[in-house]
């Protein structure tokens, strides 16, 4: 069983200041916790309902866990529908990305669901390093961790002064950012170690970061698009850019990407229609975009 004092300590982790203070975060739900238990992240505590333990004996056979009642799980969970598994996890040390690896840079992303979805999508396309500006939403926000659907285990996320970091990149390395005006995304010659920059949902890439961008790219509007659509959702824009990078980068053939697509995949697609439709089908958060 779990004490009232322990419930109070875990509830404090609902707040950023206590997550920062104790360097801990929460992981909730079966899929995310299963991914967590297969990762190298350090689990401080695991809480499970009796029903889940009895129905999934093999999953928890060698894992120390504390039994809680559904009511207790509801008190420690951040979700409106409490899960049957909840873990308290140590935040790993932040490490800047190594040189010569593909990198996604996020400038002032404010919505935790967007950040989590972007990290999940980066993992899908094989980008394992994400660098956030200091004014991005906190990565360990429970809504963000939930939106990654376990990708927080595979993708290394760090914070840094973005202009300072980008200014140190070697000459010739692509730093490609998305803007309303720029080279059409479909014509750009991507490279394996590109740095892809995505700006905030409302204002795009900030001026100091824009000065470091070497290639300004734009996602062309589809024919007949309405004037009410001024821009794309940041997570959708990031997914489109990463899909194009994954398909067209010089080091790999498109056949690798096709293996992850339904029925062998469609690589040479109109990314403003077919690819977005695929995202809407795969990720519920894209349905209203």
Image: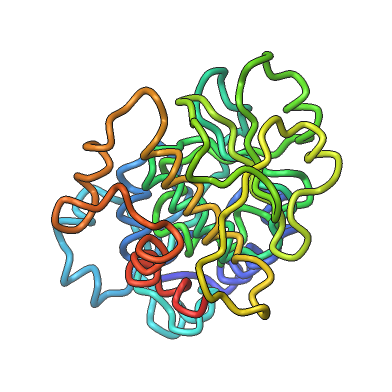
Quarter where residue 221 is shown:
bottom right
254 lies above or below 218: above
| Residue 155 screen position, x and y as percent | 47, 41
| Residue 251 screen position, x and y as percent | 36, 23
In the image, taking residue 9 as reference, residue 119 lies left or right, namely left
In the image, taking residue 190 as reference, residue 172 lies left or right, namely right
Residue visible at 31% across and 48% down? Answer: 268
Q: Residue furthest right?
A: 208
141 lies above or below 195: below
| Residue 269 screen position, x and y as percent | 33, 54
- Depth check: 154 or 271 in front? 271
Q: Is residue 101 visible?
A: yes
230 lies above or below 236: below
Residue visible at 37% across and 63% down? Answer: 66
Q: Residue furthest front?
A: 223
In the image, taking residue 83 as reference, residue 212 lies left or right, namely right
- Depth check: 132 or 166 in front? 166
Quarter where residue 39 is shown:
top left
Q: Is residue 9 visible?
A: no
- Depth check: 198 or 114 in front? 198
Residue visible at 62% across and 63% down? Answer: 112
Residue visible at 42% across and 57% down? Answer: 271
Tally of marks:
0
| Residue 63 screen position, x and y as percent | 28, 50
Q: In which quadrant will I find the N terminus?
A: bottom left
């Amino acid at each position: 069983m779990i004490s009232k004092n322990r419930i109070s300590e875990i509830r404090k982790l609902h707040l950023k200041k206590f997550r920062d203070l104790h360097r801990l975060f929460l992981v909730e739900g079966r899929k995310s916790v299963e991914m967590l238990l297969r990762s190298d992240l350090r689990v401080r505590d695991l809480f499970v309902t009796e029903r889940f333990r009895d129905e999934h004996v093999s999953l928890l056979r060698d894992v120390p866990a504390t039994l809680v009642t559904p009511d207790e799980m509801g008190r420690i969970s951040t979700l409106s529908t409490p899960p049957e598994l909840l873990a308290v996890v140590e935040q790993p040390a932040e490490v800047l990305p190594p040189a010569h690896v593909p990198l996604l840079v996020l400038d002032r992303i404010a919505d935790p669901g967007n950040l989590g979805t972007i990290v999940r999508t980066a993992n899908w396309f094989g980008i394992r390093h994400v660098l956030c500006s200091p004014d991005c939403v906190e990565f360990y926000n429970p809504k963000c961790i939930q939106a990654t659907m376990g990708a927080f285990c595979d993708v290394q996320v760090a914070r840094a002064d973005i202009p300072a970091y980008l200014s140190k990149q070697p000459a010739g390395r692509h730093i490609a950012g998305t803007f309303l005006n720029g080279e059409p995304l479909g014509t750009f010659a991507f490279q394996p170690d590109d740095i892809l920059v995505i700006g905030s949902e409302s204002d795009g890439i900030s001026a100091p970061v824009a000065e470091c961008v070497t290639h300004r790219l734009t996602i062309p509007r589809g024919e007949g698009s309405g004037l009410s659509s001024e821009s794309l959702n940041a997570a959708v824009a990031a997914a489109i850019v990463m899909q194009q990078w994954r398909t067209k980068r010089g080091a790999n053939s498109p056949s690798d990407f096709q293996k992850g697509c339904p029925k062998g995949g469609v690589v040479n697609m109109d990314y403003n229609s077919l690819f977005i439709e695929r995202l809407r089908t795969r990720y519920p958060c894209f349905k209203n975009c």
